[in-house]
Structure formats: C-alpha cells, structure tokens
Image (cartoon, rainbow, N blue to C red):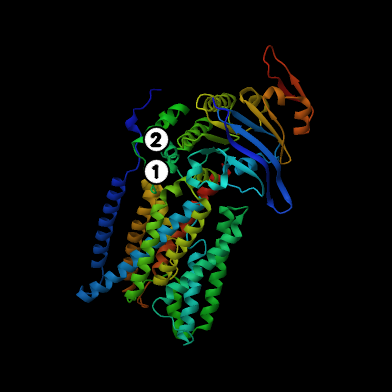
Amino acid sequence: MSEPPAETLQALSAGRLLRDGLILLAAAIVVAGACSMVGVAELTVNVWRMRLLRLATASAVGSALAAAGMALQALLRNPLAEPYVLGVSSGAGVGVLVGSVLAARGLFRIGWAGTPALALAGAVGSCLVVYGVAQRRGRLDPYVLLLSGVIVNVFNGALMLAILLLSRSADIINFVGWGMGQIGDATDASLLWLCAAFILAAWSVLFLRGAWFNALGLGDDVAGSAGVPVHWLRVETFALAALMTAAAVALAGPVGFVGLIVPHVCRMIIGADHRRLVLFSGFVGAMFLMLADTLCRTVGEWVSVGSVPVGIITAISGGPFFIHLLRGRLKESSA
Amino acid sequence: MSDRHVIQAAEVEFEYRPGQPVLRGASLTASAGKLVCVLGPNGSGKTTLLRCLLGQLRPCGGRILLDGKPLGRYSPRGLARLMAYVPQTPRSAFAFTVQELVLMGRLAHTGLLGLAGAQDLAVARQAMIMTGTLPFVSRTLEELSGGEAQCAMIARALAQQPSVMLLDEPTSQLDIRNQLQIHRMMQRLAHDWGMAVVCISHDVNLAARFADELALMREGQVLAAGQPLDVMREDILEKTYDVHVELIRAGDDPIPFLRAR
C-alpha cells in the first residue's frame, strides 16, 4: 500500500474552533429570533421582551444540561450518563424544593441567590453519594455509577413527593409543574444572569478540558500516562456538572434527557473530538430547548392549565432515545 | 547504547486493601536500550507493578526512581514526556480515527486545548510510519484488526517521544504473526531508539527469544531477573509457575524452549 502524503495528516486548529463557534452562535440567534415570532398573542414589545427572556432562560438551561451531559459521558466513557439519569438534577430539585416549601411557610428567606445555592447543595450531595458508591480502588466503575445514579434518582423523587405533602395545597400545582421541568414567563432576571454567568464559566472550563476528555476515552491509565491528571479531572468535572445542573434546575426545575440526546446527536454529526463536542453540545442544547419550549408555549396557549412543562417534551423524546442507546450498549457488551 | 538506569523500582510494596499486600518488596530495573519482559502467573502482581511504575498507583513502601528522581516529583505532564504506556486491549469509548488517536500522544507537548502544530504532526507521522499505521489515518479502532489496532496504540505512545515505554500484555489477544511483529517492534524501540521497554507477557518462549532481560514474578515479588539464558532454568520456572516444566534445546539456538508438563 502506498504511503499517503504528509498533507493527509490534519489537526484541529484554533481557526476551525473559532469558525465553529461563530456559525453556532449565528444559528442560535436565528433560532431565538424565529422562536420569538411564534405564538398566538399579538407581538407587542412587551410580549416580545417576555418571550426573549424566556428564550434566554431556555438556552441557558439547554446549554448547561447538554454540556454537563457531554462532560459526564466523556468522564464515565458511557453515552448513557447525564445529570438527570445520574440523579444530579433530582438532587438539585430536592434542594430547591426544601427551600421553596420552607419559604412558602415563612420559615426561611430564600433571596435571589438562594435558589441556585440550594440547588447546588442538593446537586453536590447527590454527586458525592453517587461518586462515593461507584469509586473502588481509586477507579470509577461506570456501570455501578450509573446504577447508583438511578437509585439516587428514585430516592430523590420520593423525597420530592414527601416534601410536596408538607406544602400548602395552593402551591402543589406549581411545584408539580416545576418538578417536571418548566420554564415560566416570569423568570427573575437577576436569577437568570447569575445562573447564566455560572453556566458560561463552567462551560468555558469544560471547553479547555476537551483534549483531556479525548484521552480519557482510552482509559484512565492511558490518559494518566498521556499527562492527564485523571483524579483532578474527575473531581473538577463532577463539580462543574453539578454547578451547571444546579443553575439549570434553579431556572427551570429538573428537565430530563437534554444531556443525553444532545451530546449523542452532536457526536453522530461531528465525530468524537470533545474539543468541538463541548462547543457544539452547548449551542445545540440551547437551540434544542428553545425549540422545545416554544412548542410548549404554543401548545400551552391552547390547553386549560395555560402551560406545558418543557420536561414533558424532553422526556417523551428522551425516554425512547435512552432505551435505544441502552439496547445498543447491551448488544456491544454481548458481542 | 547507554547503561544508565532509566527506571528503577526498589523493594516496592503495595496493597489495595489494608493487610492484603499485592506487591511485597518487588524490585525491577529497566535500562535504556533494553527490552525487559515481566513474566509470572496470574495474580502475581505484574500489572500492579506496571501501574506503580506508571505513577498511577502510589506504593506504600519502597521507591521508584525515573532517571534518578522519585516518580512523585514529576508532574503528570512532565512524566508523560518521559514515559508512555500501551494497554492490553486497544479500546476506545468513542470513535476516534487513528490520526486523532495518535495525535493524543502529543498532549503533553501541546497547549491546553491540545491543538497540534507542524512539529506535532511530523512526530505523529513518524510514529505512524514506524508502526505501519499511516495507511489507516482515517479509520477508527473498530475498523482495524486486533494487530493493527495495537500498532495504532503503540503509535500513540510513540508520539509522546518517551524514553521509557511500558506495555501491559500487548500481544495477549493477537495471532502469532502479530505477536512476532509487536515483539520485533519492541526490540527495535529498545535497540534502535534507545528506549527502556518494559513489557508484561504470558508467553515465556516469545519473551525469552526477544527480551534482553526477563523478570519472573510470584506473589508480589520478583523471584529472578536477568538475561534469558540465566533465568530460563527449570527450577526457577517451576517455582514461579508451580508446574513441572521441561526445557528443550532446538539446534544451535542458545535459548531453550519451555514445555509445561
């Protein structure tokens, strides 16, 4: 076989990453613009402003969950990993719900930064439990981790239901909608900017870790021998995923499966290089949730309760997707 | 060829659980320009010793020196510039192409984003030529045969430009032709490139034929180490593997052939 010329070796360049980023940003702006036009109500300045705030919330939540899902999948070398499946989202949800119920009863002043702080406490708590159970001999067993995540998720779900029983009946309908993952029309702008800042900071760090995530795909020992501080990367990635998930849950409740669907679709389109995947996952996650929430908002204008939680759409599309991935994984294992 | 000791493990002890030692004072030295094969039964501590040499496990006793400096004093990046590792099974969780895979070997030489420059591409290309993987640049590991995939993993390790190469049973899942190819490659890395190559193996005959030195392990200790002619003795091999063995000499080949009875 003849030897290919030197030019056949091509590496990812900073220029290509910049071009990717600009194209994705332009696409996200176009999607946001198009979504802001959709709706039954007359498009006044106030309506448009409200829709843009809602779209900004959706994009922050979508990018956070997708980037966190991508990072967890890379870390655990498992396409089934994501904040919702691992119980991180529900942990954050428990944190927020405890604060909200106590605040509703006048026992606690939650403040504008209180929601993300409580969400972060819950997310970190879940991460510690899941991580602690799955760690053995300094290594993480991806399957044990996934399984412990599922169990923590069920436990947190039960905890949320128990907390709901303690809340006032008037608040229950709001909490139920929030528990499914809902983006409201009246997101607190201060909360949005705070969460968006956290998400952007965490996303930037994950972007810088793309090359390390690539090496991690070859196993802990290979990555370590290539110069990756594996233990530090694990702790950092869990912390960043918890932070991003907490910010997303503080804004919209536990929205499921975004972190599962988006990274996988991105991987199918652009390949396995995590330096591009972090970028794509964040932007595509933002666009996905803007579209899903616009659908919910539009349908919500026709239904009696007036709103449809976006988590319903993501769960309806994500559930079968999860089963599809799981079956593929099982086929691989038995091959 | 230099006689300078490159990597040296002295009286290394390690336990995963307290009171259950896996390594009990294992000592091993791999010099530049030498291929050292570590042999021993399953559970004798070979892979644990390799992971200690790699810096992935921290021994609870003894010391490991790389170029005279304790392993713990190197940063992960600094260590990666000196030492590379090839795992037993060439496996990737994601569908990287061979080119992407080999360029990952440049991680310790590039910036934070791991963006490769002209020099990195040249080194990667050289590693691919050396391992015969250049024709497969756009293929993923899954699209390669076992031997080709292992060569791609070796190319990735070579792209690190290490002076020490550690391989964990690189030929355990390969056919005879590929086993010979990988052993010849390891020999070339040691003799022509001056690397210190440490390879775990289960094939005593192949190891004895290609290695400059053999180290036989049992129950967390190195029972015997030295040139194949010195170590390939029935008493040593029987003590190592706990089976009756017979050494057969064929023609004028100085290295005897092992047959278990």
Which x, y percent locates residue A181?
42, 70
Q: Nearer the viewer, mark 1 or mark 2?
A: 1
Q: Return the residue nearer the eye: B139 or A298.
A: B139
Q: Is residue A317 visible?
A: no
Q: Quadrant of residue B24?
A: top right
Decide if residue A110 is on the left or right side of residue B223. left
Label 1, residues with CA under 10 Å away: few <14, some 14-19, many ≥20: some
Residue pointed to by mark 2: B138
- Give the residue furthest to the bottom: A106
**Mark 2, secondary structure of its residue:** loop
Q: Is residue A209 visible?
A: yes
Residue pointed to by mark 1: B110
Residue pictured at 55% horizontal, 48% vertical: A330
Which x, y percent locates residue B206?
64, 25
Label 2, residues with CA under 10 Å away: few <14, some 14-19, many ≥20: some
Residue pictured at 64% horizontal, 47% vertical: B59
Mark 2 falls within which chain?
A: B
Where A193 sits versus B105, above or below?
below
Mark 1 falls within which chain?
A: B
Which x, y percent locates residue B194?
52, 28
Q: Return the residue nearer the eye: A215 or A51.
A: A215
Q: Quadrant of residue B114?
A: top left
Where A174 sits versus B260, above or below?
below
Which x, y percent locates residue A295?
33, 66
Decide if residue A166 is on the left or right side of residue B201. left
Q: Return the residue nearer the eye: B63 or A208.
A: B63
**How far is mark 1 from mark 2, CA to CA?**
22 Å
- Three-letter code for the amino acid on which mark 1 is drawn: Thr
Where A26 sits versus B54, above or below?
below
Q: Quadrant of residue B202?
A: top right
